[in-house]
Amino acid sequence: MTPRQRQRAIRGTLYLLLAAVVVAAILFADWGSIQRNFFRWDIAVEMFPEVLVQFALNTLIYTLVAFVFGLILALALALMRLSPVGPYRWIATAYIELFRSVPALVTILLVNFGIPLAFGRRVPGGLLGIAAVGLGAVAAAYMAETIRAGIEAVPRGQMEAARSLGMRPSQAMFSIILPQAFRIIIPPLTNEFVLLIKDTSLLFVVGTTPLTRELTKFGRDTMQTLGNATPMVVAAFIYMIITLPLTYLVRRLEKRGARGR
Amino acid sequence: MAVDLTAPPIQIVGLGKKFGELEVLKGIDLQVNAGEVVCVIGPSGSGKSTLLRCVNRLEEPTSGKILIEGVDMTDPDVDIDKLRTRIGMVFQHFNLFPHLTVIDNLTIAQRKVLKRSKQEAREIALANLERVGLLEKVNEYPNRLSGGQQQRVAIARALSMKPDMMLFDEPTSALDPELIGEVLDVMRRLAKDGMTMMVVTHEMGFAREVADRVIFMDGGVIVEQGPPREVLTNPQHERTRRFLSMIL
């Protein structure tokens, strides 16, 4: 066999294998049961509009406060990691390593139950506060590393040019370096945002009221009430319609960012 | 810090610079007078770029003094940012701010550092863009410009601070040969207008024509200096002769 023929044979075999798996899945799945348990149209329709205007919205709000809090903290951590002052670097490094190695669920629980024990008062803002501090603290650790990488990706000459024009280090950082760094890191930051959307499903551990539930908790509660899995499928679908446009947006932004370089 | 207007723009006294164990500058003494154009030539690794970068303290000198208009640049208490606004710097790789349009490249430091009004900064920027012949590029982003155009914008950006002197760090070394001329033209006009200039360059034609004084550096010291005719056509030192014969 020539290499070309061999490649064709391999590809043909792979297609056959794929077809066999698909056919088997179609033949052996209990379609009636799947439809009854996961795709009950009447149940799905019944969930609207609350699932969107209340619970998907909650999810987005929790994500946003966590992201904003996390981003500000991450920026401070990134600048600390690049600081010439040793203790700043050590603190930032310790923070980042700590929160990257601890599960988000543990952090949320510690923020919810640990802070009242340690400081005698709860995190303000109820579940919003927990979302911001708990989820934001974890996201900050990851985003700090992303921002640092972004700052380091800006050529050295940019800082030199800014300083030679008389800018103070902080002016150069905020008006010259960071705008370029953020253009570079928009894709990984958006990725972090998508991960945060999904991580809000962890907030149930601190207890929610019927109105403060996020998408997953609402889906699960409804599933248990009705004894049917359709609500989870609806929730999953809504996660998808939130995150897919975001990845599309990133692609657009990347193109626009490329123009400015 | 009183600015002494009778003091020379640049006065370098016993300047030394080490990178770790490597001694790049070994006691440089040099004075650049008002309106003078000084070209610094020499083989790579001779310390000429480091010397230039020490003048506005992009590199920290290890020893010696640098006086800018009589003010000690190396004094730890000096307001270095203020002093740097007196010194324009042009880089080999232009270093325009890619996220800003040409006009914003020219106005950002005027606004943030010199606190000029938007209107005033814009007028000064436009005047300098015209000076380098790029008025029509005012709203372009740097990556839409050729290398030569980018370097001319970079010169206009430095000029917009209205500096008393300009430093050029191999301004044409990163350019395609056909784009070098337009940048040298701008620099030639600048020299004619009386700007004090210190230029690290490999362009011997430019040095011969424009420089008041040529400095040949090698191994971290000034080997010889003088009017371009003498240094370039009748060098006194063997090292200068060898360098010139290699590049001409």
Image (cartoon, coloured by chain):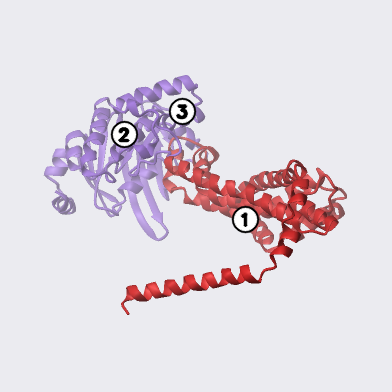
Residue B186 percent location from the top left of the image: 26, 31
Say which chain is red.
Answer: A
Residue A142's disc is 1
Mark 3 chain: B
Chain letter for the residue marked with disc 2 in the picture: B
Q: Position of residue B153 (x, y in %)?
A: 35, 33
Q: Nearer the viewer, mark 1 or mark 3?
A: 1
Residue B36 picture quarter: top left
Q: Measure how far apart labels 2 and 1 are at the Cα level.
A: 41 Å
Residue farthest toward the left in the current orientation of the protein: B234
What residue did someone put label 2 on?
B152
Q: CA distance from mark 1 to mark 3?
A: 36 Å
Name the residue nearer the viewer: A42 or A2. A42
Q: Amino acid at mark 1?
A: Tyr
User: Label 3, on which residue?
Assistant: B110
**For chain B, what colour was chosen?**
purple
